[in-house]
Image (cartoon, rainbow, N blue to C red):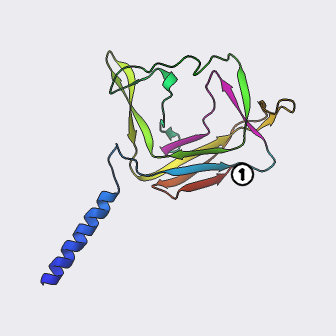
Amino acid sequence: MRCNRIFVAAALAASTLAACSESKDPAVSPGTVTLRLLLPEGQEFCDLIYNCNGPTHIRIGKESGNWLTVGVSPCDSVARCSTCTPPVCSDGACPTIGIAVGVPVTSVETTWNGSTVDWSTCGSGARCYSPTFVPAGRYVARLCATPGMTDADTQTTCMQTGPEECVETTFDLPAPPLVEVSLR
């Protein structure tokens, strides 16, 4: 009888330890994953960037269409909720170009550690954000690229030749270190 109690106590301790290893703490990353879009051979892709606003190649969410905010640009002038003070964007960090500039795309990849932001208000109702992490679980990624053609003279500018093409995939976080998806 004593052996059975010791075995049950050891099994309970092991299951408690296993449950604690998967953190649900919003201040702790559940792990990382690299998401990579494999572009078709022999086809060019490009992005249009207008006043520092470019396309978002990869979106991540709990379900398709319900995308997470993964980061906030320091030039967005949105305050962090803990300070309620908007960041100061250094001069030249995001110059106003005034025209759309196309740049060639050779790879689409990001590494995500489960980070996201929660939105709220602070002070006199100003919008603010708090960095946090998602819990471990199943997520969906939408990976996109826009067909284009590189300028033969400059080799650095690109013109869009078709609509953005996208593919979605599901993955678990924590996940295998690399999730690759072909555009076609």
Residue at the (33%, 24%) spot, across then down: 83
What is the x, y in percent for residue 14? 27, 68
Q: Pick the residue in front: 43 or 82.
A: 82
Residue 161 vertical placement versus 112 (above, below): above
Residue at the (50%, 23%) spot, across then down: 76
Does 141 sit left or right of 31 as displayed? right
Task: Confirm whether the magenta stretch covers residue 179.
Answer: no
- Which quarter of the picture shows residue 47? top right
Does 14 sit left or right of 166 as displayed? left
Farthest-out residue, right: 153
Q: Secondary structure at mark 1?
A: loop
Residue where numbered disc 1 is placed = 184
Within-10-Å neighbours for mark 1: few <14, some 14–19, many 20+: few
What is the x, y in percent for residue 165? 69, 41
Q: Amino acid at mark 1?
A: Arg
What is the x, y in percent for residue 36? 62, 49
Residue at the (53%, 53%) spot, across then down: 170
What is the x, y in percent for residue 107? 68, 44
Does 60 sit left or right of 125 as displayed? right
Q: Pick the residue in front: 63 or 133.
A: 133
Give the total of numbered labels: 1
Q: Pick the residue in front: 42 or 166.
A: 42
- Over which residues does the magenta segment extend? 44-62
Quarter of the picture holding the N terminus? bottom left
Task: Confirm whether the magenta stretch covers residue 53.
Answer: yes
Residue at the (58%, 49%) spot, across then down: 35
- Which quarter of the picture shows residue 114? top left
